[in-house]
């Protein structure tokens, strides 16, 4: 299945309740269009994967394809594979208010390629395990996008992103960092700054010589939560860093009876800025206090 469109157009394919079975080529997005939409009906594959490949061109517009059709298993288990060249950002969006029912693995690969999870009304986007690698990204726009039994693996700077204007919570079994991975809490505007993001996992597993960098994190707003009975957490904690924070102060905080919250202390420079601001405030308070005493003394002398 191939979609081709002129720049600026927004092609829409409505399956109108029908089922489309893709071959190994899957969906190839080669158009230099801003968005394309595939709605209604059911998408499945005659192979092991629904393949979605972006062929983009430097300097062209960001390509997105929005899928609100249900992706389903066939007479066998079907997965989803999102790939593409590295020339341009491209997003494969799972939308709509109906759950996907496919149970195979999900693979996202390629620099600046996004798998965007945006199901609504409690619908499930992914039921199986997810593998993100080679600087690709899985992005959560809403809550409850995965089954609680799902696992996410990050490899070769694969990235898990949150980007929402609402409080967002996703719960899944394991977050595994195979070598280098990124968790990024993105708050781009004033509305999203008010939102709280929660990642809840049973286990955080970071393989030997692996490293997890947490970006965009702010204390009291963003939460990376791991169950207290996790057996790999103590080891994993030594392989976590928070961008902008002192790596020597990564620690666990008591969140509730089930979860630890992985947290970080401010860098010494931040402490200095805080103490500096406090010092200026204290100096101003003392100056106002002295001025007030002087004025009071002058009034008493007049009396």
Image (cartoon, grey):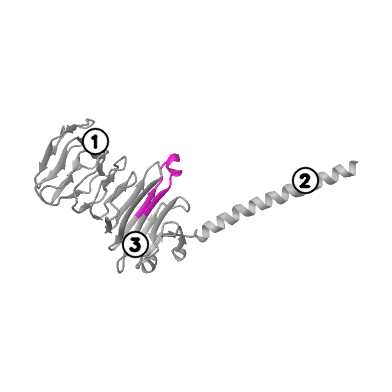
The span shown in magenta is 183-199
**Dot 1 lies on which element?**
strand
Identity of the residue furthest to the right in this view: 303
Residue 204 circle label: 3
Q: What residue is disc 1 on?
A: 35
Q: Nearer the viewer, mark 1 or mark 3?
A: 3
The numbered mark, 3 or 2, whose residue comes first in the sequence reads 3
Residue at (40, 63) in percent of width and height:
228
Q: Name the image quarter holding residue 99.
A: top left
Q: Quadrant of the C terminus?
A: top right
- Apparent side of residue 99 relative to residue 204 in the rendered image (left or right): left
Q: Nearer the viewer, residue 132 or 202?
A: 202
Coordinates of residue 223 in the picture (x, y in percent): 42, 54
Q: Is 170 inside the magenta-drawn segment?
A: no
SS at mark 3 in the image: strand
Give the answer, above or below, for where 194 lies relative to 275.
above
Q: Which residue is mark 2?
A: 292
Drawn side of residue 94 relative to residue 291, left or right: left
Front-lying residue, 251 or 35 = 251
Which numbered disc flags the more N-terminal residue, 1 or 2? 1
Evaluate if marks 3 and 2 touch, with contact meaning CB atoms under 8 Å apart. no
Q: Residue at x 15, y 41 (%)?
A: 43
In the image: residue 165, left or right of residue 26:
right
Residue 26 seen from this side:
no
Camera-near label (3 vs 2) is 3
Query: Disc 3 versus disc 2: distance between alpha carbons?
Result: 57 Å
Alpha carbon separation for disc pair 1 and 3: 36 Å
- Marks 1 and 3 close (CB-CB < 8 Å): no
Q: Position of residue 287 (x, y in %)?
A: 72, 49
Of the 4 image quadrants, the one containing the N terminus is top left
Question: Mark 1 to mark 2: distance in Å?
Answer: 65 Å
Magenta-drawn stretch contains 195? yes
């Amino acid at each position: 299945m191939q979609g081709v469109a002129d720049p600026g157009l927004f092609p829409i394919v409505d399956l109108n309740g029908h089922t489309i079975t893709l071959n190994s080529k899957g969906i190839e997005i080669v158009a230099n269009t801003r968005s394309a939409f595939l709605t209604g009906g059911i998408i499945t594959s005659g192979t092991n994967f629904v393949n979605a490949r972006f062929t983009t061109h430097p300097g062209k517009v960001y390509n997105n394809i929005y899928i609100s059709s249900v992706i389903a298993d066939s007479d066998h288990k079907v997965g989803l594979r999102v790939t593409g060249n590295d020339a341009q950002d491209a997003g494969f969006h799972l939308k709509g208010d109906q759950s996907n029912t496919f149970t195979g693995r999900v693979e996202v690969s390629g620099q600046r390629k996004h798998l965007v999870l945006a199901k609504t009304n409690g619908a499930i986007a992914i039921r199986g395990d997810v593998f993100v690698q080679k600087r690709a990204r899985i992005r959560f726009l809403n809550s409850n996008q995965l089954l609680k039994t799902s696992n996410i693996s990050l490899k070769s700077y694969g990235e898990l992103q949150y980007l929402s204007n609402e409080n967002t919570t996703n719960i899944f079994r394991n977050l595994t960092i195979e070598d280098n991975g990124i968790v990024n809490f993105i708050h781009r505007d004033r509305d999203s700054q008010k939102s709280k993001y929660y990642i809840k996992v049973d286990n955080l597993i970071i393989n030997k010589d692996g490293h997890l960098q947490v970006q965009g994190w702010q204390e009291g707003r963003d939460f990376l939560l791991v169950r207290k009975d996790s057996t790999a957490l103590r080891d994993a904690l030594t392989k976590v860093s928070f961008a902008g924070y002192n790596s020597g102060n990564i620690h666990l905080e008591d969140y509730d009876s089930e979860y630890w919250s992985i947290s970080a202390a401010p860098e010494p420079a931040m402490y200095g800025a805080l103490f500096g601001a406090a010092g200026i405030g204290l100096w101003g308070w003392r100056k106002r206090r002295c001025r007030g005493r002087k004025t009071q003394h002058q009034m008493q002398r007049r009396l």
